[in-house]
Image (tube, rainbow, N blue to C red):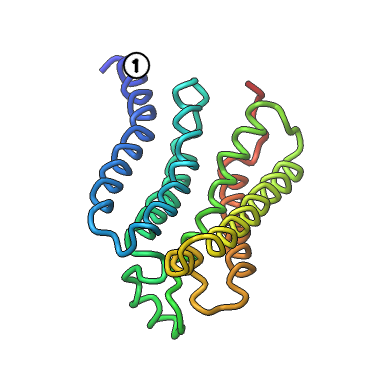
């Protein structure tokens, strides 16, 4: 095979990954839209996902692309959150993990919050790729601060929805499962996920990229 043909094939595979992930999420969304545990909670959780996915799709259409690694990391939260919308996070079949940890609650929501932090990867790609940062330490601190800011905003949205919505739907969306420190633990999970994904970014790209 000619070198040019191999290059075209590799570029095609790179461009296909986000499209495949998006298609898989659409299929998942359609399947899990059938018979959710709580339709009100399904709407609340999926609107959150749509708010997250829409700007990523818009950026893709506008030609602002991320790496396949970034798209895969971003998709983890989207897939998990869609599952949580179907079952409600407190009722996702996650008992084997609960038993393994010896926990008293379903920790599927903690896992989902941990993957929120994965979004630091595309943030780092953007700020460094666009020349908005020339210092890796600053990039990492900025990315972590951005994730924690979004985490705090989401906790406030959860609180407002829980107060204003139907009590049953509000409690299901809040997902605190009786833990008075649930919001703080969720934000900690977001931050730990960001630290892990930030470390992965630094390991894969020890050198600062050239600005676009």
Where is residue 5? Give x, y as percent.
30, 16
Residue that numbered label 1 is attached to: 3
Q: Nearer the viewer, residue 45 or 141?
A: 45
Residue 189 placement (x, y as % from top left): 58, 64
For the image, the number of numbered tags is: 1
Residue 108 in percent (x, y) is at 43, 67
**Nearer to us in this view, 210 or 22:** 22
Where is the N terminus found, in terms of image quarters? top left
- Residue positioned 44% across, 23% down in the render: 61
Whether 202 is drawn above or below 81: the answer is above
Q: Position of residue 97 (x, y in %)?
A: 38, 75
Say if 12 sits above or below 179 in the image.
Answer: above
Few, some or many residues within 10 Å of mark 1 (<14, 14–19, 20+): few
> Which quarter of the figure is the C terminus placed in?
top right
Residue drawn at x 44%, y 81% is 101
The answer to which of 88 and 83 lies nearer the viewer is 88
121 left or right of 38?
Answer: right
> Which residue corresponds to the image point at 66% horizontal and 24% vertical from the top-left?
211
Q: Picture quarter containing residue 133?
A: top right
Please, what secondary structure does the residue beneath circle 1 have?
helix
């Amino acid at each position: 095979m000619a070198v040019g043909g191999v290059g075209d094939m590799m570029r095609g595979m790179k461009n296909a990954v986000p499209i495949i992930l998006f298609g898989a999420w659409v299929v998942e969304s359609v399947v899990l839209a059938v018979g959710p545990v709580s339709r009100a909670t399904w709407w609340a959780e999926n609107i959150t996902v749509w708010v997250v996915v829409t700007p990523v799709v818009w950026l893709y259409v506008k030609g602002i692309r991320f790496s396949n690694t970034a798209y895969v990391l971003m998709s983890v939260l989207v897939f998990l959150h869609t599952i949580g919308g179907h079952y409600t996070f407190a009722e996702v079949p996650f008992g084997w993990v609960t038993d393994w940890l010896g926990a008293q609650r379903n920790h599927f929501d903690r896992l989902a919050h941990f993957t929120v932090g994965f979004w630091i990867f595309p943030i780092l790609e953007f700020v460094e790729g666009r020349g908005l940062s020339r210092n890796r330490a600053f990039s990492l601190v900025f990315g972590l601060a951005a994730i924690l800011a979004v985490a705090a905003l989401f906790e406030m949205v959860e609180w407002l929805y829980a107060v204003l919505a139907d009590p049953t739907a509000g409690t299901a969306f809040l997902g605190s499962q009786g833990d008075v420190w649930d919001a703080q633990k969720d934000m900690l999970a977001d931050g730990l996920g960001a630290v892990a994904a930030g470390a992965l970014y630094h390991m894969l790209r020890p050198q600062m990229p050239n600005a676009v």
